[in-house]
Amino acid sequence: MKYEYSDNLEELVTYGFDEIDSSEQVEVNLKDLMYVFSTLQEYQRFFHQPSHYQSIDDIENFLGSVKDQKAYRLLHNSIHKKMQLMLPTHISDKYDEGSFDSPKLPFYFKMQK
């Protein structure tokens, strides 16, 4: 099977969003939203400065694992314990159906071969 790859991550991330009513809103827990916001800020704080990640060890130390109190755990919790619960059922169903899965793969999948 031949795959198509893209370095346009914004296009990949927003694939299928045209199916979402732009006027639809959700009410969320502010503390959970702040957890996600602060997690994204921490990723930005680390990655905005190349001197923070001069080696793969620097990145591995920042990320840790889901068992460590480091960045990967924050991201995992943001997605699976915070944001996932904020999504309306019909949007969660669309995720399960693959409606938001771009037919293109991110460029870094190609690099693994």
Image (cartoon, rainbow, N blue to C red):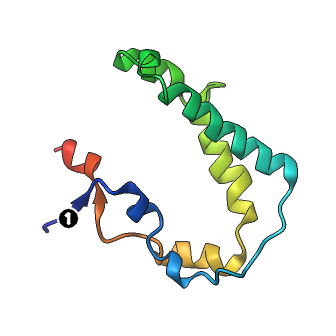
Q: For residue 58, which quarter of the picture?
A: top left
Residue at 23% x, 59% y: name it.
Answer: 5
Residue in front for this viewpoint, 100 or 67: 100
Q: Is residue 58 above or below residue 6?
A: above
**Could you say where residue 14 lies in the image, as x and y percent from the top left?**
48, 67
The single residue placed furthest to the left in the displayed view is 2
Q: Is residue 53 above or below residue 29?
A: above
Residue at 56% x, 34% y: name it.
Answer: 44
Which amino acid type is shown beneath numbered disc 1? Glu
Q: For residue 74, which quarter of the picture?
A: top right
Residue at 31% x, 71% y: name it.
Answer: 103
Q: Quadrant of the C terminus?
A: top left
Report crowding for label 1: few under 14, some 14 to 19, many 20 or more residues within 10 A (C-alpha): few
Residue at 52% x, 22% y: name it.
Answer: 62
Q: Tell me the residue that label 1 is attached to.
A: 4
Q: Quadrant of the N terminus?
A: bottom left
**Could you say where residue 85 lies in the image, as x and y percent from the top left?**
74, 62
Q: Is residue 63 above or below residue 9?
A: above
Mark 1 element type = loop
Q: For residue 12, which quarter of the picture?
A: bottom left
Q: Is residue 63 left or right of residue 92?
A: left
**Could you say where residue 106 lies in the image, as x and y percent from the top left?**
31, 54
